[in-house]
Image: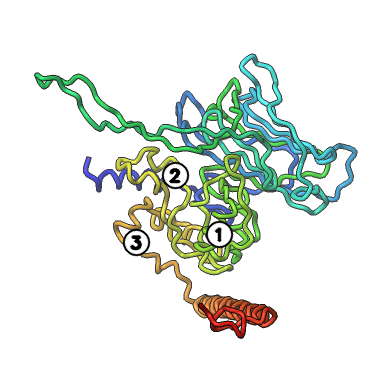
Amino acid sequence: MHFATKFHCIFVLASAMFSSIPAHSMNCLDDFDLDDVQSYTYQIPNSDQKEKPHYWDHHQLNYYVFGKFDDSTSDQETKITAGVYNHDKLIYETEINCNKGTYSNKILNRKSQIEELFAGKLDRNLTSCKAGEPFDLILKVNNFNAMSWIFNAQPLQYGVKEFRKRIANTKTAVQTDENNVRTGITETKKYVDGVKRPLTKITSKYHAYLATKFVLKASGNARFDRLVFGQCNAWPKGMESRCQDVRNWIHTRSKANLTEETMEDHLRDFPFDVNVTRGLGVFGNNRIVHNPLCLTTKYFNFLQSLVHPDRGIPQDPFNPSLRSMRAYCCCTDMRTGQVFNNDPENNCVFAPQCLWAGTSCQRAFDPTLGTEIEREFTRLREEEERKEKEQVSEALEEHVDTESKLAAVLHINNTNADTGVLAGNTPS
């Protein structure tokens, strides 16, 4: 198949995957409000194995739940329970008990018994369960037996394994005998060290891609007000014109695993990220390459070059070198961070196309924000210049201070500063 034909097929399929996109998520399949309910069952799209077998297999999925704790009076404990089911059979659930400050994750194991896989304490610095406080709960499906619950940026799982992973076999030489008959092939195995994965697999009787419904239940003061599903990033409502806050929120729940050293490198590339955390590593939601890009602390970049992919983009692109760019490139609304005009068909393409065709999103630039953005750039430039001057000034002060201390030491020791020997003595 000709390249242009391949790309056209990818793009048409990809465009069909986008649904109507509200202003608090990007490239999600469903995003809708719930009326402060305490129970809800979501039927997962395209999950009927008879009609569409293996539809979601090998695809990463995101379930987002948003809610709040109200001030109603209740005799019940405040609990939040969420789980994925194969019809009426449990796959994986979490139960959060605010009164006790605990969580418990359970599966239906292969003996058809309910089994607790994880249990722990809630981080009260992240969750107080006080009236008026919002909460968010994410289920990230990474693969058949790899799922992670995240509550208010706290991973509800633990245990990490580190190993050496073989990534390729490279044929380097063919051995032949005196008759030029091949006798063997020498292969060089390529490995990458330090690969990290969750220690415990979610070995439910039914794997993640057999889920047909997502069930929410709450009691006490907990209420659900929004549900999002897809292969996407989502964030709380009310964050228009707050790009950096959105970016921080997504980053805190991401697979980032920044160290002190890599944090310095990260801040050089993204100077607005001064308040980001180190991320959740293997228990996080999406990779940080899919975090939204900000033009200023308020406004989103009008071209987002690596929007989270969905099943419209092949798992193994026809060109292996494109694997790291398996994403969308989208013209974006600068205030909301959404696809420009909510029209992905005309504003999103396979990410490498941005490079090949030199995609321009000038149409998405809001000229009414130009003056404000220029002021922000000027302020940042002046602040950077001020910091540089302060660094130079501190370095000079340190140099002068060092010279003064040296002169004092030489004076006390009656030493000639020019010759470095005791005054009155002649160097030999």
Q: Which residue is mark 1?
A: 264
Marks 2 and 3, how far apart in space?
A: 21 Å
Q: Earlier in the sequence, mark 1 or mark 2?
A: 2
Residue drawn 67% across the image and 43% down it: 137
List x then y, in percent, for residue 200. 61, 28
Taking the image as drawn, is residue 73 in sight? Answer: yes
List x then y, in percent, for residue 329. 41, 55
Residue drawn 90% across the image and 38% down it: 75
- Colouring of the image: rainbow
Residue at the top extreme of this rendering:
111
Is there a contact, CB below 8 Å, between mark 1 and mark 2? no
Drawn side of residue 85 relative to residue 16, left or right: right
Q: Which residue is mark 3?
A: 359
Q: Amino acid at mark 3?
A: Thr
Drawn side of residue 308 relative to residue 396, left or right: left
List x then y, in percent, for residue 304. 45, 59
Q: Nearer the viewer, residue 248 or 53?
A: 248
* In this view, 84 is above or below 405: above
Could you tell me which secondary element the residue under label 3 belongs to? Answer: loop
Q: Nearer the viewer, mark 1 or mark 3?
A: 1
Name the mark on residue 17: 2
Q: Nearer the viewer, residue 27 or 154?
A: 154
Is there a contact, CB below 8 Å, between mark 1 and mark 3? no
Quarter placement of the N terminus: top left
Q: Earlier in the sequence, mark 1 or mark 3?
A: 1
Drawn side of residue 420 relative to residue 104, left or right: left
Residue drawn 85% across the image and 50% down it: 71
Mark 2, residues whose alpha carbon is within 10 Å: few (<14), some, or many (≥20)?
Answer: some
Q: Amino acid at mark 1?
A: Glu
Q: Amino acid at mark 2?
A: Met
Quarter-of-image position of residue 132 = bottom right
